[in-house]
Amino acid sequence: MKSYMTIKEAAAKWNLSPRRVQILCAQARIPGLERFGSAWAIPADATQPPDGRIKSGTFIQPDSSTKSNGSQRRHGKYFGGSSWSEE
């Protein structure tokens, strides 16, 4: 029979927060992961998935065709004005 660990045990083993392990489970990034009802079963011998964040230090700009042209300015309670407006 396979042995499994809980989300809390995986978080402690991999030095992550339990919420981060839940997210990795929801994204199915842990090999051998199984779900029993509402609980995740993580294989005891599973390794921590690789970190998908940028490590090269190079930020890749999004495609310029999808960027807004900056014509909308935010004006409102949290941006110093009274309402949204177009300029």
Image (cartoon, grey):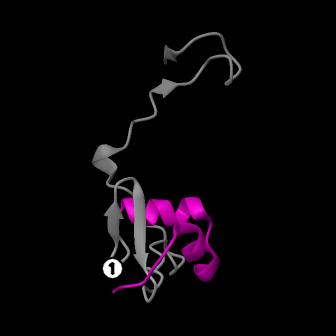
Extreme-left residue of the structure: 65
Q: Identify the secondary structure beneath mark 1.
A: loop
Horizontally, is 84 left or right of 71 in the view?
right
Residue 58, position as x, y percentages in the image: 49, 74
Query: Was residue 13 drawn as part of the magenta stretch in this picture?
Result: yes
Extreme-right residue of the structure: 80
The residue shown at (52%, 79%) is: 55
Residue 54, position as x, y percentages in the image: 49, 73
Q: Which residues are magenta?
A: 1-28
Q: Quadrant of residue 17?
A: bottom right
The residue shown at (58%, 75%) is: 9
SS assignment for the magenta stretch, majority: helix
Going by the numbered disc 1, the residue's amino acid type is Pro
Residue 71 makes an appearance in the image: yes
What residue sits right under mark 1 in the picture?
A: 31
Extreme-front residue of the structure: 1
Horizontally, is 79 left or right of 61 in the view?
right
Residue 10, position as x, y percentages in the image: 55, 76
Q: Quadrant of the N terminus?
A: bottom left
Whether 22 is drawn above or below 45: the answer is: above
Tell which of 76 and 3 is nearer to you. 3
Extreme-bottom residue of the structure: 45
Q: How many marks?
A: 1
Residue 28 makes an appearance in the image: no
Query: Was residue 59 drawn as part of the magenta stretch in this picture?
Result: no
Q: Quadrant of residue 62?
A: bottom left
The residue shown at (44%, 27%) is: 71
Whether 76 is drawn above or below 63: the answer is: above
Tell which of 42 and 56 is nearer to you. 42
